[in-house]
Image (tube, helix red, strand yellow):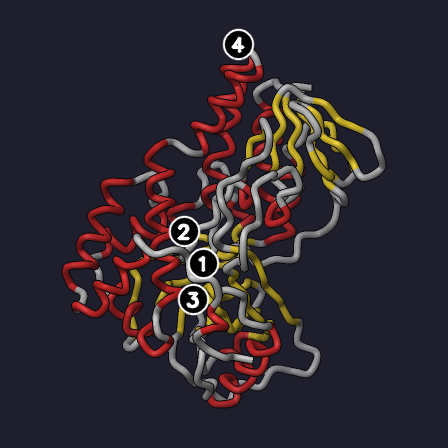
Amino acid sequence: MDVLVVGGGPAGLALAAACGRRGLVTGLLDPAPERPWMATYGMWDRELPADLPASVVAARASGRVIAVTEHRLGWDYAVLDVPALQAHLAGQLTGVQVHSGRAVGSPERGVVALADGTHLRASVVVDAGGRWRPLDRSSPGGTPAEQTAYGLIVDEDTAAPLVATGDALFMDWRPDHGEAGWPTFLYAVPLGGGRVLLEETSLARRPGLPLATLRRRLHARLAVHDVRPTDDARSEKVSFRVDHPRHRGHDVLGFGAAAPLIHPATGFSLASSLTLAPRVADALAAHLPDGPDRALAAAQSAVWPPAARAVHHLRRIGLEALLRMPPGEVPGFFEQFFDLPERHRWTYLTGRDDLRGNVATHGHLFRVSSSRMRRRLVLPAVLPPLRSNDAVTSDR
């Protein structure tokens, strides 16, 4: 086959479908291709791909943030209907051969080894296996920085004291949970159908803040606001790495969260994956006639042009700054960030290949910061990554 995509999540399906539409002989490998997706996916309304059906959007809401004070972002937040998204992407796999199996490595170029001892071959292999990156050969290296969250799904009336109908509370840094230690925030967004997700979130920590801590804090926060979920309220548990190094698989293209396309400061990756899938497919279709080497190089350039590599490096410095920041200063930092002009906030949150815009954003943030905050923001550029937050704070 021409292309084999390993991983049947949103990024993998989007890329496999795009390759199939361009006439490439495409395969998709996943341990359970029809397993329902359980995560909550959202993106800013302005990031929605033009070809995404309106039915895939479960809810739109006006974004706001509470750091020290409240900020209206001026953008709508779109929460996706995950079953509809999965059905939409799966429905585009016409002509794509779907294989059920677990990839355990790539012993040589163009070959994927499966757990059952069989092999699949393709001119170009793509690792879209998410956080597990089954074809990656890079060293894991130290304790990962993780975003973790624990949430409950409640009805709109129950959530009303915290989030009004038509609103999405992107971040609420108020310490209403009553605990000292590592800072966490409430993420409260409508899911459609009269449902709201209330989620206590640790943006990033090395290692991730335990889910038990987040669960305890969420219940304490909700009690302060007289929000009383039912005993049978469905829960959501989140844990993923935000500081993966770039994919180093042998002659393999990393895509989606495996690339990693995860924004180190937000954890978002879906919008980037859906936007890049047709570009990567175009690169593969255009260059496969010149051989697998040219096609792989062109696809890698589509995912990681020089500007995107530079922006990702800047974002990783920002992540390290956040990991090193004293917990009491974190809400103040976000107060300062969300006070930035809209163009700077938008560029930092979404502009993965806008190097000039991101440099301007960092420069503006530096100019308005205190001397102490300036040191917080700059020192991570010359210091090694923090080995563990456990050496600084105790949160268990």
Residue with the most extreme top position: 290
Q: In the displayed structure, does residue 299 sit left or right of residue 305? A: right
Q: CA distance from mark 1 to mark 4?
A: 44 Å
Disc 2 vs disc 1: Cβ atoms closer than 8 Å? yes
The residue drawn where x is 61% and y is 36% is 127
- Amino acid type at circle 1 is Arg
Q: CA distance from mark 2 to mark 3?
A: 12 Å
Q: Nearer the viewer, mark 1 or mark 4?
A: 4
Mark 1 lies on residue: 60
Dot 3 or dot 1: first in sequence order is 1
The residue drawn where x is 29% and y is 66% is 72
Q: CA distance from mark 4 to mark 3?
A: 48 Å
Dot 1 or dot 4: first in sequence order is 1
Mark 3 lies on residue: 168
- Amino acid type at circle 4 is Asp
User: Can you give x and y, in whole percent of width and height, for residue 269 in the image?
Assistant: 48, 48
Crowding near pointer 1: few (<14 within 10 Å), some, many (20+)?
Answer: many
Disc 2 vs disc 3: Cβ atoms closer than 8 Å? no
Q: Would you place residue 126 above or below residue 11 in this image?
A: above
Quadrant into which the N terminus falls: top right
Q: Would you place residue 312 above or below residue 230 in this image?
A: above
Q: Would you place residue 186 above or below residue 52 in this image?
A: below
The residue drawn where x is 27% and y is 65% is 376
Q: Nearer the viewer, mark 4 or mark 3?
A: 4
